[in-house]
Amino acid sequence: MLNKGLLIVISAPSGAGKSTICGRYLKKHPDTSYSISVTTRKPRKGEKEGKDYYFVSEKEFKSFIKKGDFLEYARVFGEYYGTRRSSVEGKLNKGKNVLLDIDVKGALQLMKKINGVFIFVLPPSKKVLVSRLKERKTDKKAEILKRLRIANKELAYINKYDYVIINDKLSDAVSNISLIIQAEKHSVINNGAVIEKCVKLFSKTEADKWKK
Ligand code: 5GP
């Protein structure tokens, strides 16, 4: 029996550098699969369908909800975002790790229904967060203010997560994610199949064979 893959959920306030961390981690660990979300938001410059997101209309998104296609979904910054079951479940069952870059509302839904490691990424300071949001030039001032207000609300849920990473230096943040995942791979809860095999090996029948 194969051990199931690890579900890795990463959340962060917008501008904390979560997407960059996830991108770097995935480059270093090509065996980990990235769950491409479905969203109703319009593609930003340079974003590609099926690589960054699956871009759909609100009508399509709602039909996915009706069919029960989503493992979780949430409305973030006025748009819908969701994780399809098909992007996650099959891969986990095949023993592959799956990485999700999702918001706090979505992560809270998953915590209730699936085993995984939940990581919260923080910026080193509010000043850094604001300057990162400004640097992105993808969002207008009103949008930046909205994102900061939401960040404030999201922080209230940090203690529901398993780990916290301060994204001060990108390479350190990525290494720390790798270390967390390495440790999780050895947790008792994630090694059911190996433990089961060992228990059989140490069973009375096996011990009896040794006596002969
Ligand atoms: P952005 O529009 O900047 O790419 O993403 C906005 C927010 O939506 C980010 O916090 C991102 O993590 C979150 N997000 C992306 N995909 C999903 C998803 O499938 N589910 C949920 N709940 N949030 C998502």
Image: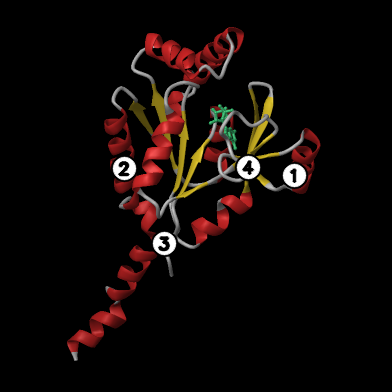
Q: Is disc 4 in contact with disc 3, using a CB cutoff of under 8 Å?
A: no
Report the mark closest to the observer, 4 or 3.
4
- Residue 172, percent from left and from top: 27, 31
Q: In the image, ligand 1 is in what quadrant?
A: top right
Q: Name which of mark 1 and mark 2 comes first in the sequence.
A: 1
Q: Mark 1 vs mark 3: give the one in front.
A: 1
> 210 left or right of 138?
left
Instruction: Please give the residue where the numbered disc 3 appears in the rendered image.
Output: 3
The answer to whether marks 3 and 2 mark residues whose Cβ atoms lie closer than 8 Å is no
Give above or below for 209 relative to 147: below
> Mark 3 or mark 2, which is nearer to you?
2
According to the picture, the residue beneath numbered tag 4 turns out to be 49
Answer few, some or many: residues within 10 Å of disc 2's Cα (few below 14, many 20 plus, some between 14 and 19): some
The amino acid type found where label 1 is placed reads: Phe
As helix, strand or loop, the secondary structure at mark 2 comes to helix
Query: In the image, residue 140 lies at what x, y percent?
Result: 59, 11
143 in relation to 53, above or below: above
Q: Is mark 2 within 8 Å of ligand 1?
A: no
Earlier in the chain: of badge 4 and badge 3, it is 3
**Which is nearer the eye, 7 or 42?**
42
User: What amino acid is at disc 4?
Assistant: Glu
Residue at the image position 44 percent from the left and 52 percent from the top: 97
Q: Earlier in the sequence, mark 3 or mark 2?
A: 3
Numbered label attached to residue 178: 2
Disc 1 to disc 2, how far (Cα)? Answer: 33 Å
Front label number (1 vs 4): 4
Along the polypeptide, which appears first: circle 2 or circle 4? Answer: 4
**Distance between the alpha carbons at the discs numbered 2 and 4:** 28 Å
Q: CA distance from mark 1 to mark 3?
A: 30 Å
Query: Would you identify the image quadrant in which residue 64 lies?
Result: top right
Which of disc 3 and disc 1 is earlier in sequence? 3
The circle drawn on residue 64 is 1
